[in-house]
């Protein structure tokens, strides 16, 4: 029984549940799997784009993104605002900034941010919490403050944003994390 479980785990991981699984020199995940929602402002109101095929194409090399065929991927629209939801595991070599950089390859309206994220349970967060969030993330890379607000942080298309830094800043700002981002 023990051998079959070990064999199953080896086969499961070796088959590449996440894009990084088959790479020998890849770092271990920094944390657990989160169910991430990323808003795609460049495609707000565009009913046909991006497609699953387009998203899979640009995110296929993202080591922190669960592969579509093995995980629950969703494209949704909420009041005209497009978003994608997927399994996400921050890695030393692959993080939110890499996702933003990959999403920029899809095009869309360049005058809008490539991606926006929110980790708080209730939005918008208060002005005081947003001020603390900005203070905590003042030195962080990859955040587009011009297009960020109390409801969501905009990510720069050049990358650099780190989930761990953003999550920690939300906590230090006193925001209650959404269930998907709480410690389990």
Image: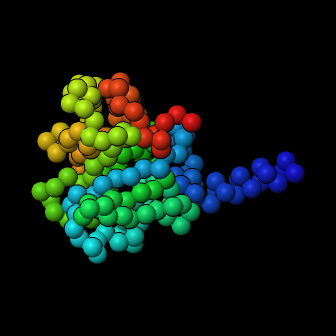
Quarter of the rendering occupied by the C terminus: top right
Residue 178 position within the rendered picture, expressed as x and y whole percent measured from the top left? 42, 41
Q: Which of 66 and 148 is in front in this view?
A: 148
Task: Judge whether 154 appears above or below 46 on screen.
Answer: above
- Please tell me which residue lies in front, 76 or 86: 76
| Residue 50, quarter of the rendered image | bottom left
Residue 162 pos. (x, y %):
36, 38
Along the viewing direction, whichever of 110 and 10 lies nearer the viewer:
110
Asked if residue 115 can be seen in this view, the reply is yes
Residue 134: in sight, yes or no? no
Counting the numbered discs, the total is 0
Query: Colour scheme used in the picture?
Result: rainbow
Rendered residue at 38%/52% (across/down): 37
Q: What residue is drawn where x is 50% and y is 56%?
A: 66
Is 52 displayed left or right of 32 in the figure? left
42 w.r.t. 129: above or below:
below
Where 149 falls versus 137 (above or below)? below
């Amino acid at each position: 029984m023990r051998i079959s479980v070990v064999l199953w785990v080896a086969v499961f991981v070796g088959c590449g549940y996440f894009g990084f699984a088959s790479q020998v020199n890849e770092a271990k995940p920094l944390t657990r799997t989160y169910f991430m929602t990323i808003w795609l402002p460049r495609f707000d109101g565009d009913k046909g784009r991006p497609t699953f095929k387009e998203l899979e194409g640009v995110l296929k090399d993202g080591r922190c993104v669960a592969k579509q065929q093995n995980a629950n991927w969703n494209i949704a629209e909420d009041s005209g605002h497009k978003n994608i939801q997927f399994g996400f595991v921050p890695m030393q070599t692959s993080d939110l900034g890499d996702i933003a950089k990959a999403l920029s390859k899809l095009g869309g309206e360049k005058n809008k941010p490539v991606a926006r994220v929110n980790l708080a349970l209730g939005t918008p967060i208060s002005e005081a919490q947003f001020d603390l969030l900005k203070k905590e993330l003042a030195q962080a890379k990859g955040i587009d403050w011009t297009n960020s607000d109390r409801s969501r942080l905009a990510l720069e298309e050049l990358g650099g944003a780190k989930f761990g830094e953003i999550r920690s800043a939300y906590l230090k700002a006193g925001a209650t994390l959404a269930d998907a981002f709480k410690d389990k």
